Amino acid sequence: MPSRVWLQPTAQLRPLLRHRMAKPVAFGLSLLPFFWLLYAAIFNQLGANPAEALVRATGDWSLRFLCLVLAVTPLRIISNTPTLASYRRMLGLFVYFYVVLHLLSYSWFDMGFDVADIGRDIAKRPFILVGFSAFVLLTALALTSFNRAIRALGAKRWQLLHRLVYVVAGLALLHFFWMRAGKNDFAEVVVYALILGILLGWRLIRFISKIRR
Amino acid sequence: MLIKTNRDGFCQLRNSDITDQSLYAGRRDLMKLMASGAAGAALSTWASREALAQGVSAIARPGKLASLPSVKSAVPGAVTLEKLTDYKDASSYNNFYEFGTDKSDPASNAHTLKTSPWTVEIEGLVKRPAKYTLEDLLKLSAQQERIYRLRCVEGWSMVIPWIGYSLSELIKKVEPLGSAKYVEFVTLADPKTMPGVGSRVLDWPYVEGLRLDEAMHPLTLLSFGMYGEVLPNQSGAPLRLVVPWKYGFKSGKSLVKIRFTDKQPATAWNKAAANEYGFYSNVNPNVDHPRWSQATERRIGEDGLFAKKRKTLMFNGYEAQVGQLYAGMDLKKFF
């Protein structure tokens, strides 16, 4: 891939990304939402309905990190910055981190950790089922995210498995859409759909043009 | 003492704070005795004032808006003894889509609402259609304080001391015709002052409705205030409906028109999603919303993060008062 003129400034970013402190900084930044929510929960800054605020915020941050991790490859290729690839696993695991917090908040604050109730809720409400399915798929990806798992599976199979993240993106969006459908309020859903649409669409176009060649 | 004031200066009433009836009665006797002169002239004015004050609201005003004096309501079921929701929560966590769909939007945006002058048109199948000014309505009947549970269809609840009088007082004045079977409530939809009215979330204006017998029920409140003061804009100033046994969205805010009809009104949420929001929308723990359970609820400000949610009561706990309105009806069908 030729690097394009309009993206040349990113060349200066490359040494920054390779700096020995770059990853710890990215790690710390990714934890900021978590620490903010923790602080807000302890110091009563979450408004009148803290449970709802936590469930929503952790869901929002799951979606945001999902967009981030899906942006890594397009950005890497368009800007010709191979270093970016080394951030992908960390961001992917942060998606899982916030998804786990999201599921925990729901199970704890909404369902009081009543496993039978949670089971019934998943069976009864399609939007919960969709969210839960996304969690199950992400669990498989998180469990196979380390190097030995890659070696054990073989690169081909591993890559195939990890393409499930595209399914997760679809499920997450549907989950969010269904949640907002109750209020007929799709402004935010549209924003995430656009971002994910661009990120997945870029892959699709690239895939098609590769086949044609 | 009835009042417990916390740091924010808002009043919270607990069961334990409520004076035992015998003590209360005894205290009044003592006061009467004092007022009758036995305790001396200097004390007597104070004592009679206190005795008089017993009939008046015991809720500390938040001190934000104009005071709206009221007397305690004698309507059965109109005064729950549960702990009041903080004024801060009740006035900052609202659904009022005309000002935005986020629950913090109404508190930040509703300052643009112009509540004076204000008129309410009464029309349709009535003998005396009329245009009432807010001032007329405020004086139409004695303002009462009623402490109602409020259950939102979203699964949370509050306890709010409203001020107003039974809607039936107004209905009696306008004399519905025999053909009137329903009452439709039309609320303000002013795109200039209400940023949410431009959105396509709902059909504007927001319309709600009740069967005439529901509207005539003494618990159905035409409310002008809460916590001893006039309503804050985000809570539906200058006047709104409060129907405590139905999900909150049935209680229209900032009313401009009350229309008597022979047909069931097409209500806003029912038009938006008929399978999710029925015309009746009585609080019912046995009939779930298609996307969530209605069996439990979270009491705002009281049920902490780690507390299990409380059970939702049939008709929001007003079954004894309103159950007979629905005798023989299939509440799963007429949800």
Image (tube, coloured by chain):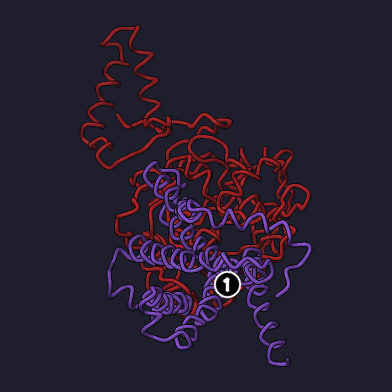
Chain colours: A purple, B red
Residue at 42% over, 30% down: B9
- The residue tagged 1 is A177
Q: Residues within 10 Å of mark 1 (few under 14, many from 20)?
A: many
Q: Nearer the viewer, residue A55 or B105?
A: A55
Q: Residue furthest bottom?
A: A212
Which amino acid, mark 1?
Phe
Location of residue B258 with respect to B81 vertically, above or below: below
Q: Position of residue A13 (x, y in %)?
A: 63, 55
Q: Is residue B189 left or right of residue A160?
A: right
Q: Position of residue B122 (x, y in %)?
A: 70, 54
Q: Position of residue A130 (x, y in %)?
A: 47, 78
Q: Position of residue B326 (x, y in %)?
A: 44, 71
Residue at 55% over, 73% down: A178
Q: Nearer the viewer, residue B217 or A136?
A: A136
Q: Is residue B248 left or right of residue B131?
A: left
Q: Is residue B141 left or right of residue B8?
A: right
Q: Nearer the viewer, residue B58 or A83?
A: A83
Location of residue A188 with respect to B8 vertically, above or below: below
